[in-house]
Amino acid sequence: MKQQGTIRKVRGAVVSGLLVLVCGLFCLATSAAAQVASYAEKQTGDNYGNELPAVLKGASIDQHLNTMMPDVPFVDEMGKPVRMAEYFGHSKPAVLALVYFQCPMLCSEELDGLTQALAMVHLDPAKDFNVLIISIDPTDTPVMAAQKKALYTKRYARPGTDAGWHFLTGPQQSIDAVARAVGFGYVRIPSSDGSTTQFAHASAIQILTPEGKIAQYYLGVEYSPKDLLLGLVEASGNKIGSPVANILTYCYHYDPHRNKHSLLVARVVQFGGMITVAGLGGFIVLMFRRDLKLGREHALTRRND
């Protein structure tokens, strides 16, 4: 009797703890939903079939392998004027990413994925290759670029490699020239009140040869360290890779019917939270049913005794 009572108390404590966890996850999921709805006064629109919204048709990536990067001017994170040609003509390949520093969505996921993958590659920036992060937003500043560089080199956590990371800002003409060379389509979308600007674009990185030609594309926001290493090694020998499947991850979700916007990351968090809540809820129901069944069997046993 005493042992069974102890078991039931433990089960009760576990169930209570799970209830608290479920409530917390539910609050988190609803909080995320509220943030999506209120961010820059935007709301989630309804879905209208599987057709790609018109605004995203301009946010494509055409793989221009073997294309030379243009020699156009930018400004680095220190405020120093630079030209693209300064990063080529040597023996080092480069990793290129087109993002924007004020992005509230997948740009950070893309840079996180790149940083984590490079951390598992035994080659070192500055010594073996360069990392070029170029903003597609002409209003981004060198101060913002310096902040991003400090954040991602800290996450990379490999001393002595900061000189290989370059966060560049520049005029619209330079941005357009690089985007055309890369085949990187993006669409500028101002908010309804004109106070903020976002860009619809797909997430991808490119490997460049030491000469400045595009050797390989990697699409999405997570990258295989093995593939990155292979791409850098092959590009260092000026070898041009093959096209990859154009499965795109968009940085922007847009409803053209209602002019509404939402964050893809937050949607993923909400969906994951709902799955977790449903799973834990089902587990709790099973625990309660099992506990009630054991209670009935115990009661019947006591009557028979």
Image (cartoon, rainbow, N blue to C red):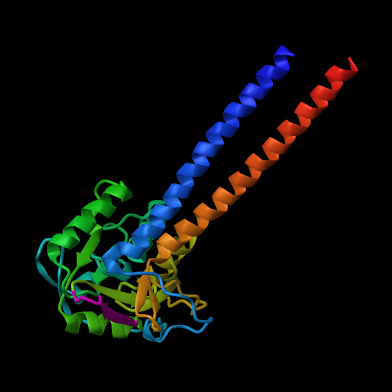
Membership of 189 in magenta stretch: yes
* Quadrant of the frame with the C terminus: top right
Picture coordinates of residue 275, whole percent (x, y)? 56, 54
Picture coordinates of residue 215, whole percent (x, y)? 40, 76
Q: Quadrant of residue 89?
A: bottom left
Q: Is residue 281 above or below residue 3?
A: below
Membership of 207 in magenta stretch: no
Picture coordinates of residue 110, whole percent (x, y)? 37, 63
Foreground of the two, 250 or 253: 253
Viewed as shown, does residue 206 lie left or right of 1? left
Residue occupying the point 23% across, 58% down: 148
Foreground of the two, 66 or 150: 150
Viewed as shown, does residue 94 lie left or right of 145? right
Residue occupying the point 32% across, 80% down: 186
Magenta part of the chain: 185-194
Foreground of the two, 272 or 231: 272
- Residue furthest right in the image: 304
Q: Is residue 50 above or below residue 100?
A: below
Q: Is residue 69 visible?
A: no
Q: Quadrant of residue 133?
A: bottom left
Q: Quadrant of residue 261?
A: bottom left
